[in-house]
Amino acid sequence: MITKLTLTLEKEVIETAKEYAKEKGQSLSDLVENYFKLITKGRREIQPEQLSPRIQRLRGIITLDNDFDYKKVLTEELSKKYGI
């Protein structure tokens, strides 16, 4: 369900946010919605139908072993990239 929200912000913040959204190819509403989703992620459970069609298409295309340690792989890849 889409609901309208009115925000009161400093003009400079709005203009900068509009520029940023335009650079990212998003609407300002999408930008604000995504930010709110990010900061409230721990307080809600996202249902599959709430995901964008692009994300829905990506779900399930990667399968990993139960013992896969993403932190180990991430550390290894960052070490390779930055020569640490």
Image: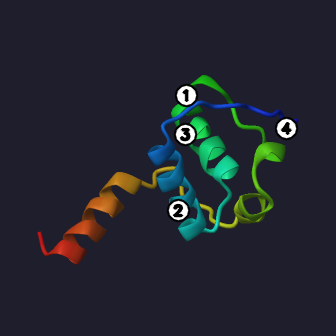
Q: CA distance from mark 2 to mark 1?
A: 29 Å
Element type at marker 1? helix
Q: Earlier in the sequence, mark 2 or mark 1?
A: 2
- The residue wearing badge 3 is 38
Indicate left or right for 41 with 10 as reference: right
Judge the density around disc 4: few (<14), some (14-19), many (≥20) Cα neighbours within 10 Å. few
Q: Nearer the viewer, mark 4 or mark 3?
A: 4
Element type at marker 4? loop
Asked if the residue at tag 1 contacts the one at tag 2, i.e. Cβ–Cβ closer than 8 Å, the answer is no
Q: In what quadrant of the picture does the N terminus appear?
A: top right
In x, y percent, where is residue 15?
A: 52, 53
What amino acid is found at the position of numbered circle 3 in the picture?
Answer: Leu
Identify the colour scheme used.
rainbow
- The residue wearing badge 2 is 19
Q: Which mark is residue 42?
A: 1
Q: Nearer the viewer, mark 1 or mark 4?
A: 4
What amino acid is found at the position of numbered circle 2 in the picture?
Answer: Glu
Judge the density around disc 1: few (<14), some (14-19), many (≥20) Cα neighbours within 10 Å. few
Residue at 51% x, 61% y is 20
- The residue wearing badge 4 is 2
Q: In what quadrant of the picture does the C terminus appear?
A: bottom left
Residue in the foreground of this view, choosing between 32 and 80: 32
Element type at marker 2? helix
